């Protein structure tokens, strides 16, 4: 179970907003986290409680560049999950591959308000708005993706497979 | 029911019938990484204790995003790429050779029917020659380098028929900007787009690449143009590698079919800070600009510099405008030099930066000032894209950018095209 307070963003949050390219000089999630959402809102980090914030965004979250630094920065600053009405394709893959929990639910994205306390059951895809009592159901992931998520990311899965094969 | 190009390419790669929505693990023909994304891939590779790469001759690294290096930290990352490449025998395209996507196509690496992944979102460009190519992240690049394979969801395909003919002063860029506005920034998410019709047939391979380059701006996974005689001769001039052309079945099942009559299209301008906001030039004319940029994987090729030179020849860039030009590759640069286009542009007041991404990604070579308006031939105008969130970026064709650079305000290029 994942739990946190909602920080709400709009539609089409792009990767230049999430992490401007000038910070791609680092691959360290902690360093990247210092600039998370800087392009979108220079005061974003003041809205975050590390380990207890869930991002809730509109449609097409993470559109733009293929930079994996984007989900790394989000994970690095202690955001525990991202709920969006929809995700851009490469961000979707990158988030799963690095083990950042993401959930797609138009209804949840539309209904959850800034500051609501939200809990998520990743196994069932259930999103519970504890503040209002509403429950939403996210799109379930296909089996291969569930396997990647269960392994804690693509690297862990590949490493595990390489080890079992050798 | 017949199959689309995307479905047929995946079928050939996995050796069994596939349907849209299927998740397949497929072997790739090429894996590409650039200097923004490859260092992280190398780090992931090391963390997975990678000991070898699948086929070093099918992996390509390109130093184009920050080239030449503007910072010592970037130089270190470039060296990391170089030493990793040396260790495994991977080819590196060095500083000044050009933009990754231009090199993957024009150096004769990718051929029709290939399945290509690249750690850059505009990898979708190679659909211009009928390859299925798409952008991936760094960890995925690391996994592909190790295993030669990756998981894909076989996409549904949208069929777009471009009908009529392009009027004077209207280019491939105007078509794709118009399409992006029509479809919206997420209008084709997770889907492939096939381009058909007389307009796409009339375009050169380079111009087709302008269109396929930008399909990611509507969320698409790939944009494909069925190869024709033009494609084949273009590819054959560049490589002897054998290939088998993949064409869609005549009765292919599409998620939807869109028909667009291009005959009445005007030059288009996308407004800040979104790509899917294009309007006809009349609604943008007169907006003052302080910077103009011609280049990138969208519009830094021969036809782009040709039209820019044609408009700028014998004229002057407006005194309050900085015009920056980045050829897409060394070959494009040399060709433009030979043709006298570089002289035309430089005499008009333009500034050439090395072949590569130039100021598009916002790390160097033309970061705009506060409150500036930039008109650019690039593919993205997100807030902060060019390195300053206080600047605004308008997107247009090279002709519109060149005409605007002369006037100091957004200008209809048709007045300069005799």
Image (tube, coloured by chain):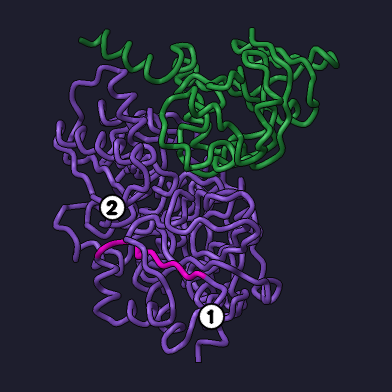
Chain colours: A green, B purple
Residue at 38 percent of width and 32 percent of height: B138
> Given the image, what chain letter belongs to the residue carrying mark 1?
B
* Residue B304: % across, % down: 41, 72
Q: Residue at x 15, y 36 (%)?
A: B86
Q: How many marks?
A: 2
Asked whether, in this view, residue A11 is left or right of residue B25, the answer is right
- Which dot, 1 or 2, sits closer to the camera? 1
Residue B406: which numbered mark, if any?
1
x%, y% of residue B91?
19, 43
Give residue B46's quadrant in the image.
top left
Q: Residues within 10 Å of mark 2 (few under 14, many from 20)?
A: many
**Res B210 label:** none
Examine the rendered structure and indicate whether residue B326 appears above or below residue A59: below
> Visible in this render: residue B374?
yes
Report, in whole angstroms, how far the alpha carbon at label 1 lies from the one at label 2: 33 Å
The one nearer the camera, B400 or B362, is B362
Residue situated in front as seen by the camera: B136 or B167: B136
Q: Is residue A16 above or below residue A93?
A: below
Q: Is residue B78 left or right of residue A64?
A: left
Q: Is residue B322 above or below residue A132?
A: below
Which residue, as the protein is rendered here, is positioned at the far right?
Answer: A132
* Residue position for label 2: B104
* Start-end of magenta stretch: B322-330
Position in image of residue B302 (x %, y %) = 34, 71
Looking at the rendered structure, the secondary structure element under dot 2 is: helix
């Amino acid at each position: 179970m994942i739990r946190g307070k909602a920080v709400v963003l709009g539609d089409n949050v792009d990767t230049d907003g999430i992490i401007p390219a000038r910070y791609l000089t680092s691959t360290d999630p902690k360093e990247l986290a210092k600039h998370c959402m800087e392009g979108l809102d220079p005061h974003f980090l003041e809205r975050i409680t590390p380990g207890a914030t869930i991002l809730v965004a509109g449609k097409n979250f993470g559109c733009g560049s293929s930079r994996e630094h984007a989900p790394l920065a989000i994970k690095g600053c202690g955001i525990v999950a991202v709920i969006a009405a929809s995700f851009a394709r490469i961000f979707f893959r990158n988030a799963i591959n690095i083990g950042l929990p993401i959930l797609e639910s138009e209804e949840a994205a539309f209904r959850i308000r800034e500051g609501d306390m939200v809990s998520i059951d990743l196994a069932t895809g259930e999103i519970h708005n504890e503040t209002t009592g509403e429950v939403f159901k996210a799109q379930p992931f296909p089996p291969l993706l569930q396997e990647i998520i269960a392994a804690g990311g693509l690297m862990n899965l590949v490493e595990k497979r390489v080890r079992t094969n050798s | 029911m017949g199959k689309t190009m995307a479905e047929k390419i995946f079928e050939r790669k996995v050796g069994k019938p596939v349907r849209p929505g299927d998740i397949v693990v497929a072997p790739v023909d090429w894996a590409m990484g650039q200097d923004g994304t490859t260092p992280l891939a190398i780090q992931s590779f090391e963390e997975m204790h990678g000991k070898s790469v699948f086929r070093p001759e099918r992996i390509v690294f390109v130093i184009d995003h920050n080239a030449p290096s503007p910072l010592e930290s970037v130089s270190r990352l470039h060296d990391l790429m170089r030493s990793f490449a040396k260790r495994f025998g991977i080819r590196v395209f060095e500083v000044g050779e050009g933009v990754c996507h231009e090199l993957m196509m024009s150096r004769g690496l990718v051929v029709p029917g290939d399945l290509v992944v690249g750690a850059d979102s505009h990898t979708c460009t190679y659909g211009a020659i009928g390859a299925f190519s798409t952008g991936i992240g760094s960890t995925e690049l690391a996994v592909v380098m190790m295993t030669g394979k990756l998981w894909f969801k076989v996409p549904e395909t949208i069929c777009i028929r471009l009908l009529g003919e392009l009027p004077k002063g209207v280019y491939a860029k105007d078509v794709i900007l118009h399409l992006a506005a029509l479809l919206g920034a997420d209008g084709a998410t997770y889907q492939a787009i096939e381009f058909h019709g007389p307009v796409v047939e009339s375009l050169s391979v380079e111009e087709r690449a302008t269109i396929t380059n930008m399909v990611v701006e509507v969320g698409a996974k790939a944009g494909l143009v069925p190869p024709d005689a033009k494609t084949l001769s273009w590819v054959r001039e560049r490589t002897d590698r054998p290939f088998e052309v993949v064409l869609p079945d005549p009765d292919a099942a599409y998620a939807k079919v869109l028909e667009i009559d291009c005959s009445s299209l005007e030059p288009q301008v996308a407004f800040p800070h979104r790509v899917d906001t294009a309007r006809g030039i009349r609604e943008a004319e007169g907006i003052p600009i302080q910077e103009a940029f011609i280049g990138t994987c969208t519009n830094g090729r021969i036809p782009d510099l040709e039209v820019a030179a044609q408009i700028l020849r014998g004229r002057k860039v407006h005194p309050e405008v900085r015009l920056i030009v980045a050829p897409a590759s060394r070959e494009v640069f040399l060709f433009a030099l030979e043709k006298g286009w570089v002289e035309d542009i430089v005499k008009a007041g333009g500034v050439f930066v090395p072949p590569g991404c130039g100021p598009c990604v916002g790390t160097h070579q033309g970061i705009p000032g506060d409150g500036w308006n930039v008109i650019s031939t690039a593919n993205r105008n997100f807030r902060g894209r060019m390195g300053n969130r206080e600047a605004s970026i308008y997107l247009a064709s090279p002709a519109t950018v060149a005409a605007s650079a002369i006037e100091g305000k957004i200008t209809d290029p048709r007045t300069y095209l005799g």
